[in-house]
Image (tube, grey):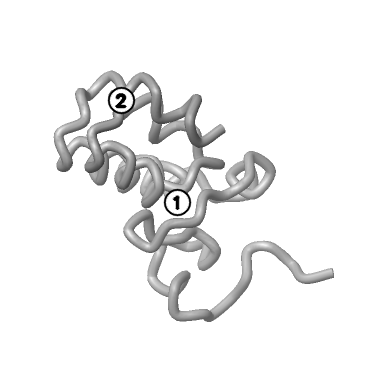
Amino acid sequence: MAAFPPQGDAVTRGWGENAGVRNPEEGDGVTAAQFELLEPASAEELLRARFEALAERGCPLGDALVIASHVEVDIVDAVGLLKRGCPPDLVLPTLA
């Protein structure tokens, strides 16, 4: 069984001390179990990057916070829905 977090691939390098945190611009949500394995600083960095990706694209801050906290949701898919006019309160039900 492969260990999490995976080490050294191009997508994961440079994201905190846990080289398994994916760049939100690259997509791929993480499972809740994977998120629990992150160091606090890496978890904070991941959540902040997800939140900023949503807020920078005009998502209301409260909705951005809720969507960003659902780490199992692919942030690229969430942003894509918002870009296509999906109301922020329907993003999670659509992707869940």
Say which amino acid is labelled 2: Pro
The residue pinned by badge 1 equals 42
Q: Which circle, 2 or 1, is nearer the viewer?
A: 2
Image position, residue 2 (x, y; %): 77, 71
Looking at this rendering, what residue extends furthest in the right direction?
Answer: 1
Residue carrying label 2: 88
Q: How far across and how far down the image is residue 3, in percent?
A: 74, 67
Where residue 20 sits in the image (x, y, percent)? 55, 63
Tell me: 19 left or right of 51.
Answer: right
Q: Amino acid at mark 1?
A: Ser
Task: State the image quarter where residue 84 is shown.
Answer: top left
* Position of the N terminus by quadrant: bottom right
**Residue positioned 20% across, 23% down in the render:** 60
Q: Residues within 10 Å of mark 2 (few under 14, many from 20)?
A: many
Taking depth in this image into account, of 3 and 17 the one nearest to the observer is 3
Circle on res. 34? none
Q: Secondary structure at mark 1?
A: helix
Quarter occupied by residue 96: top right
Position of 7 with respect to 81 (left or right) is: right
Of residue 36 and residue 10, the one placed in the foreground of this image is 10
**Vertical side of 28 occupied by 53: above or below:** above
CA gap between label 2 and label 1 equals: 26 Å
Mark 2 in CB contact with mark 1 (< 8 angstroms): no
Q: How many marks?
A: 2
The image quarter in which residue 63 lies: top left
Q: Residue at x 29, y 24 (%)?
A: 87
Q: Earlier in the sequence, mark 2 or mark 1?
A: 1
Residue reaching furthest to the front: 84
* Relative vertical location of residue 18 with respect to residue 40 in this rendering, above or below: below
Residue at 33% over, 27% down: 65
Name the residue located 47 percent from the left edge and 45 percent from the top edge: 43
Label 2: which secondary element: helix
